[in-house]
Amino acid sequence: MATILCLETTTTNCSVTLSVNGSVIAFLEDNGRQYSHAERLHVYIEQILRQEGIKETDLDAIAVSKGPGSYTGLRIGVSAAKGLCFALDIPLLSTSTLEALARKLNQVEGFVVSMLDARRMEVYSAVYTSRFDQIRETRAEILSETSFSEYLEQGKVHFIGNGVEKFKAICDHKNAVYWEEILPSSQEMGGMAEIKFNTNDFEDLAYFEPYYLKDFMVG
């Protein structure tokens, strides 16, 4: 049984979950449209531990959502996770942001496409089965009317994330199901982190970097 603190900061959602044995026992998040990570992340960490009567020294690991996503959000989350791991001498775990997003859709049929807003008509995306097995690599891609056509022709495709609005505007395929304005949350990270903890799938604290997927661009 592991007690794991999970941090999600890849979008505007500043989200902190306390997970025990893969199950969520408490969470706090600011699921708004403005970035509040610098102000809220450490406050949420302190609040959630105090609320559950758990000391930092009781934690077995820290899990962080590794991206892709906001450069600033990723840096804040990873820096906080690394700092805690160094101070407490506990392992760092990383989880896929897009897989956690897909896992918000339980008991759906067909495919799941996690889609986060990037720039203009570009999104970060990955394709999963309804059992969350990834069947297409993560990409930064420019959307067109024919994007994901190979999956849409096979059956229902559930699109989820804050990039969905872009694709909905250009694709009216009968098999497309849109779940709009949903952001990744730390609540889905607990089970994923528990599996990694139990298999000793830890990150190297000195060298771990967020999964940016593409180079930083200004403007």
Image (tube, rainbow, N blue to C red):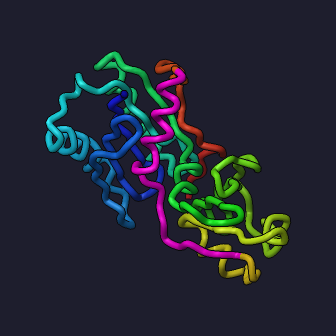
> What's the residue at 59%, 42% (across, down)?
212
Q: Magenta segment: does it hold 90?
A: no
In screen coordinates, is 212 left or right of 56? right
Q: Quadrant of the C terminus?
A: bottom right
The spot of residue 77 in percent (x, y) is 40, 40
Q: Nearer the viewer, residue 39 or 43?
A: 43
Task: Assess whether residue 177 is covered by the magenta stretch.
Answer: yes
Q: Position of residue 82 (x, y in %)?
A: 39, 27
Q: Quick check: 40 above or below 172?
A: above
Residue 80 visible in the current orientation: no
Q: Quadrant of the N terminus?
A: top left
Comparing 184 with 69, the one in front is 184
> In the image, is residue 180 above or below residue 122?
below
Q: Is residue 103 visible?
A: yes
Q: What is the quadrant of residue 211 in the picture?
A: top right
Picture coordinates of residue 159 (x, y %)? 63, 67
Residue at image location 62% in from the left, 62% down from the top = 119
- Tell whether 65 sits left or right of 62: right
Q: Residue at x 53, y 73 (%)?
A: 180
In which quadrant of the rendered view does residue 57 lie? Answer: top left
Q: Is residue 79 left or right of residue 126?
A: left
Residue 54 location (% of width, % of height): 19, 33
**Residue 74 or residue 101, whichever sits in front:** 101
Left or right: where does residue 73 sit relative to residue 160?
Answer: left
Q: Which residues are magenta?
A: 176-199
Residue in the image at 19% along x and 39% along y: 46
